[in-house]
Every structure is written in structure tokens, then in C-alpha cells.
Amino acid sequence: MKIIELQSDYDKFLSENYMYDWLLVPTYSNGSYPVHIDTLSVLYVYVFLKDEEYMIAFNHTEASNIPQENVDRLPKTNRLYVHNKTRFLSVNQNDNLIDIDLAKYFETNSAFEDDYDTPAHNWFTQNFRYYKNLNTIIPILKHYERGTNIRNSFLEYYTHDVKEHDAFIRYNDYFTRNFHAIAKNGLHVNPEVFRKYFLDTSCYNGYTYSEYNIYTSTGRPSNRFNGINFAALNKDNGCRASFTSRFGEGGFLINFDFDGYHIRLLSQLVNYDFPIDESVHHHLGQYYFNKQQLSDSEYEESKKISFRLLYGGITKEYLHIDFYKRIYDLTQLLWKSYNEMSYIETPLFNRKLYKNFFKDMNASKLLNYLLQSFETERNCLVLDKLNKKQMKSKIILYTYDSFLIDFNKEDGAETITYIKEEMESGKFPVKIEIGYDYQNMIPTKIG
């Protein structure tokens, strides 16, 4: 292993190794900060065909260090396998980055375990936890040891060329890039309200940050960071008032919420046409109660019945309803294919969900796993269009069936219309709420 801490050595390293594939394991200076406001401390590099290891020092007390901007000089023509690409995009956005965590996910449907810290890492964490840039004082050799452990684990499971599969290529691009883009925007907070509800969570210059984990068994990203579960913020205790617009009087928060999203996604899979201007719960409730107009209590009961059937399995008494008959037939077809072929494929990106990924699977649960993957893949395609649009507004939170936007008024009403139309494409109507904080949102009709 060679430590690179001088500019001349770094230049030589690049010129001698740019044509080979590398494995990268980054260590950030603080480690507990959101990666978007952290810096790179050291970078472990393994050059595959040469079987050589390097530690590049950018910010460490044991080294002279080379300027951070040199991270942008990583080559663009080889393959750079990187540990947690979604994080690494904060310091380098090369198109040739390949997420080793995602490769493990495609092989096993589980995350790449991040328990490779050495006893020295644990000792420093226990005794110097309040040191601002802790990883810059942990010995470089210990970071090297961690990098080597990750390399060995990666090489152990990475046995075939998943990187060439179209589904992997699309996940490696769309998923990592778009969830990184949301997370880096951060959520602007009212510090006084934020401290009331999240006393043990830090905010940074008026912002807190989420972090999306895309390697979940269900296909739905989780979103936790610093003790906050951003995917399940309490709607009733007032904590959502912590989150406000960064644009002050020049902006507001706007939430786009899909109507009956899972039901409408399923309708696409079975080619059932729900009216776009009618709630799916009202539409189905007409069959449940055999009447055209529903009372408020019947509407709520309709929602309960639908959710029970979708997530618990369709019982015979509802098979006379065409929609549920189609869902039942699809469920049986998927279950048959799953058992005969030992996998099924997700609807949009064609990722294989192998039988050995799951325990205690049944037909109803399999349909739900497929549905949640379908939801995430479609949302990722929508997010990709929104993230590429030139606008001052920021997407700040993704919660499965809704997108929260920190809207800048300078973008104008046409931008709201654009977002709404992109989300609704394919007959997926959205409801809109607007407010100056996330707790006090007012339903609004646009378009």
C-alpha cells in the first residue's frame, strides 16, 4: 500500500492507472455529518488488474494532503466501483461510477453491510465523539484496513457481471443520482420549533438532511438520518411545523400527493381504466355498497376494504368486481411464474426478484413486493424529469406517494403545472397542498 499525499505523486498515480478499473472506498472527514456538507478525508483505491492499493490523503492530520478539487480529476474512461455511490456523488459525479452496494443488492436483495470499522475506529468514536472531524485523527492505516475489508467482502460476492444487465445500469443511474439530488437539497427548518421536537438532532446553517437507503427488501427506499424517520413524520403532534421554505416570503412548501396510488398502479398492470376525475375509493365503494353516492362513513369504509383486499389478499366475495378479478388472476399468474422460473421481473426496469431473496413468501405478499418496486421505479423516472428541469425550486422530500417541493415563487405557476402534469402522466392524479410550513398545508386546486 502506498500513501499519496503530494500533488506530484497524485499526478503520477493518475497517469499510470487511468486505464484500469478501480475500487474506491471513501472516508469522510467527520463521518456523522450529512455527506453533502462533509469533506473527503482519505480515499482507498484498489487497482484491479495490478492488484495494488493506495490511500489518497485529502484531509488528514498524518499527511501533507492534496487539495480536495483533485477528486474531480478521477478518470472518466475506466470503471470506478465505489462504496455507497449515492453518498460519493457529493464529491464526484463521474458517469463511470458503479455502486458496489447496488451490485450486492442485485445479487442478494440486501444491503452491503457497513460494519467494517476496526476496534481503533470504535475506540476513537467512544472517546472523541465530539471531535469535529474525527476521521482525520484516526490513523490512516486503520482506514486502509477498513478499505481492505470492504474490498475482500466485495470480491467475495461479486462473482458475475451484473454491471452489464440493463436493469442494473438503470438503477445505478436513476436511483443513485435522483435520490442523491433530493437529499443534498436538505430541508430548511425553523430552529426553535425544530429543537422542540428533535432535541437530539443537529441542524446545519438552518438545514437538516435526509438520507435515502435504496437497498431495501421491499424495493421501497427508507429515509432516516440523525434519528429522524423522514418517511414517517408524525402528522398530528406538530413536528412538521419544523420544516419551512428556504425562500422566506419568496416561497412556500407545496406537496403533491398521488390519489389512490397503489390501486392506480395495479390498474395499469391489469389494464383496468379508473376515471381520472373520481377517487378510486369512491369508484370501488359504489361496488361495495351497491349505490352511486357514498356517505362520508361509507367512503372511509371503502378505503379500509380496499386496503384489506390489496395487502391481505382478495377474498371470493369480491371476485364479482372486475378490478379484483383481474388482480386475483394476476396474483395467481405471478405466483405460478415465481415458482416455476424462480423469479419475477419488476414492471419498468425488469429487475429480477429471485425466489431465494425471500423467506415465507406467499402470492399476496409477492404482488405487494412487485407493486412497491413498480411504485419506486415509476417515481424515479418522474423524479429524473423534475430534477433535470431548470428551476429555483427544490424537491426536498420523497415519501412514496407524495413529493414535497420547496417552491420559489419566481418559478411561476407554469412550473407547478409542469410538475403536476409530469406526476400525473399515465392517469395518476395528484392532490395539492400549499403552506409556509409542512404542518399547516391547505388543499389547493391547480389546473
Image (cartoon, rainbow, N blue to C red):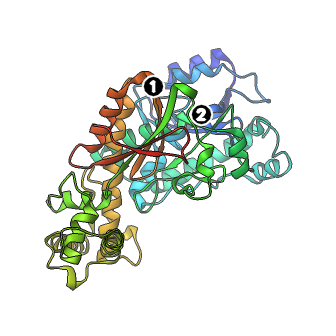
With 299 as the anchor, is 12 left or right in this view?
A: right
Determine the residue positioned at 79% across, 49% down: 125
User: Dot 2, how many residues are within 10 Å of its Cα: few (below 14), some (14-19), or many (20+)?
Assistant: some
Q: Which residue is mark 1?
A: 409
Which sits in the foreground, 195 or 211?
195
Quadrant of the rendering where the N terminus is positioned: top right
The image position of residue 214, as x and y in percent, is 46, 51
Residue type, label 1: Lys
Which residue shows up at 24% across the image and 55% down it?
Answer: 347
User: Residue 259 placed where, x, y %?
Assistant: 32, 54
* Badge 1 element: helix
Rate crowding at label 1 as few (under 14), some (14 to 19) or many (20 or more) other CA atoms within 10 Å: some
Residue at 31% across / 73% down in the picture? 298
Q: Relative to the observer, which residue lies in front, 424 or 88? A: 424
Residue located 61% across and 37% down the image? 35
Q: Which mark is residue 36?
A: 2
Secondary structure under tag 2 reads: helix
Q: Say if 133 sits above or below 272 in the image.
A: above
Tell which of 290 and 12 is nearer to you.
290
Nearest to N terminus: mark 2 or mark 1 = 2
- Please, is residue 180 above or below residue 19 in the view? below
